[in-house]
């Protein structure tokens, strides 16, 4: 009876071995890993995903402290507002309140001119009778000219005040305002860049940092496996290596999934598991070479899943 049972087990084992097609090689599913790094240095205030979580584009991943960046943004906004106000002010004339003092001065200058002209006219009538000397008349003429010049000077100042600034001054002010606007945009980008969001679809593989840690710019906070970047790794003995070329098509099967084609993307130039002895016919049988293939439907496979690969 025992012999019969052993014979039955042997037959089942033999049939199980024979069920696997020839030229089939064992492998497993792997995926590219992407490192999500801190774009700037600073204190980590929050990590919003954990290992195994699915991520999608624009999903919040982690946050860096924004205190300093917010202060820089506020300063840039204030400078931009001042520059814009200055540009607008130069594009228009002075206010009435700015001109009022000059208008008061003009009234006084006009009064002095009127007085100078009156004196000049009065003494001019007395000059033919000999009551006024030529020197006195020269003094009166000079006083009138001086009053006229003062009035003309004030009128010119009022005219200049009513005009906008010169064209080159306005262009300079507008350029300063534009540069200040660019500084605001840069400061805002810095603030936004400290709130890190996903730019791909995938699954979190490792969470490397925790809130409260100080991270340097470029330091990894998370690693993510992008969706659709799965590939197959398998090993073939050196005797079968010539059957596989980059670009060749292989067939991938696994438990519970439909068979699909895959394209060979990489053939290792180095042997794996090579014993440290001089090669011989017997030892060459132990040499295995790594091959990677990209499946047509990578989403149908799961990382770490064992597969069979055949030609």
Image (cartoon, rainbow, N blue to C red):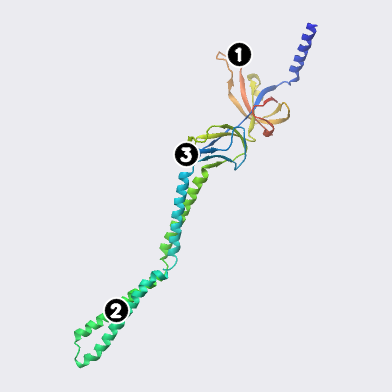
Instruction: Name the quarter where the N terminus is drawn.
Output: top right
Q: Identify the residue at image location x=31%, y=83%.
A: 114
Task: Please say whether residue 179 is visible from this viewpoint.
Answer: no
In the drawing, what numbered circle is on residue 283?
A: 1
> Disc 1 versus disc 3: distance between alpha carbons?
55 Å
Q: Nearer the viewer, residue 220 or 48?
A: 48
> Disc 3 versus disc 2: distance between alpha carbons?
70 Å
Badge 2: few (under 14), some or many (20 or more) residues near its Cα, within 10 Å? many
Q: Please name the residue that numbered disc 2 is placed on.
A: 147
Residue 238 spot, x, y in % from top left: 63, 19
Q: Identify the residue at image location x=46%, y=50%.
A: 74
Instruction: Specify which label sits upstream in the sequence, 1 or 3.
Output: 3
**Quarter holding residue 274:** top right
Q: Are marks 1 and 3 in contact (CB under 8 Å)?
A: no
Q: Is residue 220 left or right of residue 164?
A: right
The mark lying in front, picked from 1 and 3, is: 3
Badge 3: few (under 14), some or many (20 or more) residues near its Cα, within 10 Å? some
Instruction: Specify which label sits upstream in the sequence, 3 or 2.
Output: 3
Q: Is residue 307 left or right of residue 60?
A: right
In the drawing, what numbered circle is on residue 42?
A: 3
């Amino acid at each position: 009876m025992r012999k019969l049972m052993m014979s039955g087990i042997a037959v089942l084992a033999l049939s199980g071995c024979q069920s696997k097609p020839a030229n089939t090689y064992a492998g497993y599913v792997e995926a590219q890993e992407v490192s999500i790094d801190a774009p700037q240095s600073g204190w980590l205030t929050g990590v919003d995903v954990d290992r195994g979580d699915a991520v999608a584009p624009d999903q919040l991943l982690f946050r860096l402290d924004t205190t300093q960046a917010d202060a820089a943004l506020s300063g840039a906004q204030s400078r931009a507002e001042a520059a814009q106000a200055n540009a607008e002010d130069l594009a228009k004339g002075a206010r009435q309140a700015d001109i009022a003092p000059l208008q008061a001065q003009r009234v006084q200058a006009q009064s002095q001119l009127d007085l100078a002209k009156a004196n000049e006219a009065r003494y001019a009538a007395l000059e033919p009778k000999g009551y006024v000397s030529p020197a006195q008349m020269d003094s009166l003429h000079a006083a009138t000219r001086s009053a006229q010049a003062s009035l003309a000077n004030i009128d010119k100042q009022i005219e200049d005040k009513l005009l906008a600034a010169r064209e080159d001054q306005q262009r300079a002010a507008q350029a300063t305002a534009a540069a200040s606007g660019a500084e605001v945009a840069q400061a805002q980008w810095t603030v936004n860049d400290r709130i890190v969001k996903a730019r791909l679809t995938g699954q979190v593989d490792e969470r490397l940092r925790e809130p409260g840690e100080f991270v340097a710019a470029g330091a990894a906070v998370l690693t993510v496996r992008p969706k659709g970047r799965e590939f197959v790794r398998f090993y073939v003995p050196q005797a079968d290596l010539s059957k596989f070329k980059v670009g060749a098509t292989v067939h991938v099967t696994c438990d519970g999934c439909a068979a699909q084609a895959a394209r060979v993307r990489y053939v290792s130039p180095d042997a794996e598991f090579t014993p440290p002895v001089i090669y011989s016919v017997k030892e060459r049988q132990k040499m295995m070479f790594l091959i990677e293939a990209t499946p047509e439907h990578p989403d149908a496979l799961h990382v770490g899943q064992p597969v069979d690969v055949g030609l």
